[in-house]
Image: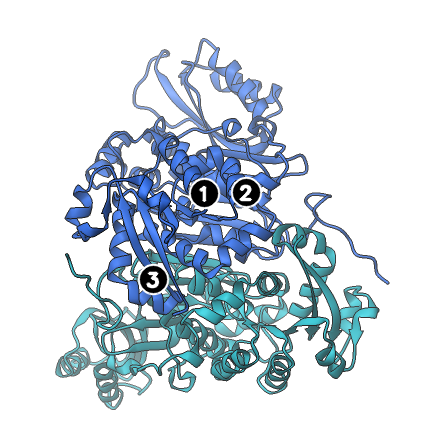
Chain colours: A cyan, B blue
């Protein structure tokens, strides 16, 4: 055992409680493996009920945050209260007090990462945040350490377990969105207010963190287009399945010649796609590097124990000096980097699934096809399922898949189609994400890759 | 850019050539990302033909290994020649000369890891070997860094791309083993002599490396039971598929109360198993931790660029000091650890697929069932496919799946069945590997986990 370190836990909910439990139960195991003897010096939280339930010794309870910040023996402050106000203040104060920080706070880092890295640099400390993204999956380390030799060209993530659980139920069992959400809430997989999860914001937070590190660029969170699964209809899940697709809430960032495109939204992927099998509350992130090609990381993206695993690995890595060495020397960090040129997703190309509700009248299909043609969108397949209802005013679904087209053109076409008297103005479009190609050693950006002179 | 480091490459084949190419083409990119400016000081190889083909500057060619070992500017020796004789000597000499080593040599580490770690410790240097296992997948880092807070209970790997490619062809296209192997050789996915790959030895090398780190124990390579895919018959692949299984060459290590069980062999897994989708030359490794639960790492397990990605990440990590900090402080290393108590796989339990070729006579099924009963093996399913041939001496396949049973009992039963006059003495048995259970915080070994006192 090479080094002892004393920490304070701020927050003792699901993740804080699991972190405390593991550190108390398995202190010897962790010391044996990591070489670091981690001692909890204090636990600060608004409400000690959960800590008491877990049987955590009351001698560790601290009600005065100032005493923690002033205690020179405490080297690491672990922030697990979440939110972007108190947490931000506490982290900044801890850093200013010369303490390293470990946090699981994705919202805070997505919005204020740059400010926090800069503060940490000023005071010579390090902020660990493996737990912010992908729960127990060591995905941050993969990006900043394992894939160090790569120009990363793309990140594709399923990074919200609540949404993936709901989509899995809808896909595999035909459950409605509302029923699947209720079940998720009953099972503790969704919060009472699930907005951050099901509307895609949580995924976007994680995407922003991963993308800024992967590309070594500042990411402007507010310009990331985000939509969630809360408006997804069962009928589209079903039609997509008939076409060989499954729907996933994807968080995507990829590099093009013009800049970086980031988006979060439900997308169809083929059943053969490497992310198609990721089911239930599990998360997975694909990273495409110019040396390593496709690599994928999978595991539990939330929950007390998995997230605590990431928290504790950061504490150990700070004590070992490995995380500080990476933070102090590598070029991934937003406070050191240039602004990203973020490309509006409407300027990018994709295939799309489209559903239009149209009157069952002669000439309607032709009119829709004509509008796609005007906007230079090539139709890959078109299906009007047979209906038992009849009457010229009955609305029937028309399901179309397109070849790759510019999204802006698609929006224009759908606007025109929605304004037809024969449709009901509710067209649905879902991107079809194909597997990202591996590009070994190829030159995607001119600035990143230089030819060597043959002597 | 914080630190420059000069290295020597020993070997310039597929991996050495890709490493040189990336370091020469992308030196600025890697310096920007990792903070390390990596300069190739010399390339030593028996034959410079491949290096010339790649356009590597001849000024780097070095024909005298002694000059490299004596050059004080060279801090890292990258061994990429393979084999366990010359490579072993070169690594030991480099270490003794005070140079760090990076290697992709799984055979050498599986057999002589303990000796090499001890030598590195003696001379105060570090050996990086991310490239030895899983090619471009940062699986070694996951085990020694990302999962630091976990007691790892099991490793399940598909770690030989050649075998997985052949099995994928056999499964998805009904190709015979011989044809799939020929295609793999034509595509550069199998060597002219594929024995190390298809007989399972390469997988066992990687398993030994991962298991010793994951469990923090010495592993005795020679007692790992290993069988490969070279004796697998198409008929069993097909019958397994009919039962809902796919066959994979699995490398498995798991912890029990009594010790560690390790094995490499073809096994059936359910189509829903998290490793079932891993196709073609790709590799994947599942690690089950007591905090993080199931995590899985996927990517290209071989090939120049992916393996070079791992090599270069190790060079950077040595220059950053992160790999030395881990090597010097953590408890994973064979030279620091106790011998493993390796449990003979025959003493463990598994489900099995069995195929027996038996005469199509009355009473044969009953006799086989009776023998299973005597050995306390419970049959889960039994199938005698209809045959168009007839005659009492025609041999027909009888396909049986068992419930979980002790492998030793199964061997005894099959020995008795093979000696019947109604069978042809060629029974086939393939384990059916179920998904390893996640055990959060549970107590698998008594020594690893301690309860804390509630004060």
Choose the circle earlier in sequence order: 1 or 2.
1
- Residue drawn at (27%, 82%), measured in percent from left and top? A346
What is the number of the mark on residue A150? 3
x and y percentages locating residue B27 in the rendered image: 29, 63
Tell me if I can see residue B294 in this picture. no
In the image, B353 versus A384, the foreground residue is B353
Q: On the image, which quarter does residue A412 sit in?
A: bottom left
Q: Are marks 1 and 2 on the same chain?
A: yes
Q: On the image, which quarter does residue A372 sit in?
A: bottom left
Dot in front, 2 or 3: 2
Q: Which residue is mark 2?
A: B122
In the image, A190 versus A52, the foreground residue is A52
In the image, B44 versus A71, the foreground residue is B44
- At label 1, counting other C-alpha atoms closer than 10 Å, the crowd grade (few under 14, some 14-19, many 20 or more) is many
The residue at the far right in this view is B455
What is the number of the mark on residue B95? 1
State yes or no: discs 1 and 3 in contact (Cβ < 8 Å): no
Q: Are marks 1 and 3 on the same chain?
A: no
* Image vertical order of residue A296 relative to residue B380, above or below: below
Q: Secondary structure at mark 2?
A: helix
Name the chain under label 1: B
In the image, B66 versus B262, the foreground residue is B66
Label 2 vs label 3: CA separation? 33 Å
x and y percentages locating residue A248 in the rendered image: 41, 67
- Residue drawn at (31%, 47%), measured in percent from left and top? B9
- Residue drawn at (37%, 68%), measured in percent from left and top? B33
């Amino acid at each position: 055992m090479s080094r002892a370190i004393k920490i304070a836990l701020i927050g003792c909910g699901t993740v804080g409680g699991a972190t405390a439990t593991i550190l108390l139960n398995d202190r010897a195991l962790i010391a044996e493996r990591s070489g670091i003897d981690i001692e909890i010096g204090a636990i600060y939280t608004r409400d000690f009920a959960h800590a008491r339930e877990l049987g955590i010794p009351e001698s560790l309870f601290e009600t005065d945050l100032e005493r923690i910040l002033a205690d020179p023996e405490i080297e690491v402050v672990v922030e697990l209260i979440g939110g972007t106000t108190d947490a931000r203040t506490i982290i900044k104060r801890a850093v200013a007090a010369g303490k390293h920080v470990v946090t699981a706070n994705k919202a805070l880092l997505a919005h204020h990462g740059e400010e926090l890295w800069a503060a940490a640099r000023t005071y010579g400390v390090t902020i660990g945040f493996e737990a912010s993204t992908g729960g127990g999956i060591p995905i941050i380390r993969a990006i900043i350490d394992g894939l160090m030799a790569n120009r990363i060209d793309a990140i594709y993530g399923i990074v919200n377990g609540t949404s993936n659980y709901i989509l899995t139920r809808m896909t595999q069992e035909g459950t409605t969105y509302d029923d699947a959400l209720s079940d998720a809430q009953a099972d503790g997989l969704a919060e009472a207010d699930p907005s951050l999860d099901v509307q895609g914001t949580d995924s976007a937070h994680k995407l922003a963190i991963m993308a800024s590190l992967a590309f070594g660029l500042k990411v402007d969170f507010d310009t990331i287009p985000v939509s969630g699964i809360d408006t997804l209809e069962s009928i589209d899940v079903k039609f997509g399945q008939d076409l060989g697709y499954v729907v996933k809430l994807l968080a995507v960032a990829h590099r093009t010649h013009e800049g970086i495109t980031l988006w979060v939204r439900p997308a169809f992927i083929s059943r053969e796609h490497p992310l198609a099998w990721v089911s239930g509350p599990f998360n997975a992130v694909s990273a495409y590097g110019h040396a390593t090609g496709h690599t994928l990381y999978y595991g539990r993206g939330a929950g007390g124990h998995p997230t605590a695993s990431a928290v504790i690995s950061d504490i150990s890595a700070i004590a070992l000096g490995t995380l500080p060495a990476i933070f102090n020397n590598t070029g991934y960090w937003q406070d050191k980097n240039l602004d990203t040129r973020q490309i509006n997703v409407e300027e990018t190309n994709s295939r799309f699934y489209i559903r239009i509700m149209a009157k069952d009248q002669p000439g309607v299909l032709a009119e829709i096809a004509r509008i796609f043609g005007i906007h230079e969108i090539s139709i890959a397949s078109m299906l009007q399922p047979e209906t038992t209802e009849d009457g010229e005013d009955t609305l029937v679904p028309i399901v179309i898949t397109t070849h790759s087209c510019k999204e802006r053109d698609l929006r224009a076409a759908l606007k025109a189609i929605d304004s037809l008297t024969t449709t009901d103005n509710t067209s649905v479009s879902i991107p079809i994400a194909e597997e990202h190609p591996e590009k070994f050693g190829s030159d995607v950006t001119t600035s990143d890759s230089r030819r060597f002179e043959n002597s």
